[in-house]
Image: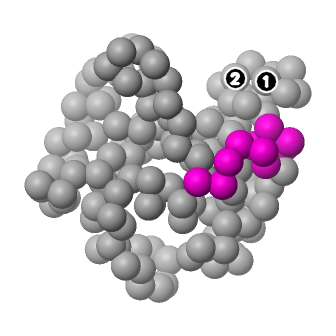
Amino acid sequence: MVSGAGAVAQAVWNDAHGFVPTYGIGDYDLVYFERADPSEPAERRAETSARSILADLGVTLDVTSEARVHEWYPQRFGRTIAPYRSTKDAIATWPTTATSIGVRRERSGQVTFCAPFGLDDLLALVVRPNKAIVARDVFEAKVGR
């Protein structure tokens, strides 16, 4: 699983402004891509498992199978999208360039990043819309938090 989106950016920006890393973070997005079983019940099992494993952190988790986002995206955002091919493919469509970032800890303990737009905007504290699929109102809602 990959943790990403707003929590990563918020933690970096909090540090840059002298706040504790968790300040203002409402939830943590955990995303994964599973072709073998992209069903909603499988996604719920993954969410239950992640919440159990990370229960001692005392945070709210939002677990999403990127293999099934195209199924609910039209109802939630009013437009159809093509199925994602990978987690990286999905991250490349997140609302802002600075939040289009995933972080994963490998079995070796090494931390890897997926940052389709690089890290420059994140580190420069720049919020720029990702125009891949995000509508203007979605972008404005994200930056208005």
Badge 2: how crowded within 10 Å, few (<14), some, or many (20+)? some
- Amino acid found under the numbered disc labelled 2: Pro
At a point 54% along the width and 65% down the height, the residue shown is: 93
Q: Secondary structure at mark 1?
A: helix
Pick the front one: 118 or 132: 118
- Determine the CA span between mark 2 and mark 1: 6 Å
Q: Quadrant of the N terminus?
A: top left
Q: Secondary structure at mark 2?
A: loop
**Looking at the image, residue 131 lies above or below residue 33:** below
**Looking at the image, residue 12 lies above or below residue 63:** above
Q: How is the image coloured?
A: one colour
Q: Earlier in the sequence, mark 2 or mark 1?
A: 1
Question: Which of the 4 image quarters holds residue 13?
Answer: top right
At a point 78% along the width and 61% down the height, the residue shown is: 128
Specify whether residue 123 is painted magenta. yes
Which residue was labeled with disc 1?
15
Which residue was labeled with disc 2?
21
Q: Is residue 56 left or right of residue 139?
A: left
- Amino acid found under the numbered disc labelled 1: Asp
Q: Position of residue 139 (x, y in %)?
A: 69, 67
Q: Position of residue 81 (x, y in %)?
A: 41, 80
The stretch of residues the image draws in magenta is: 116-125
**Looking at the image, residue 21 lies above or below residue 49:** above
Question: Which of the 4 image quarters holds residue 137?
Answer: bottom right
Q: Position of residue 102 (x, y in %)?
A: 52, 42
Q: Is residue 89 visible?
A: yes
As drawn, the residue found furthest toward the bottom would be 79
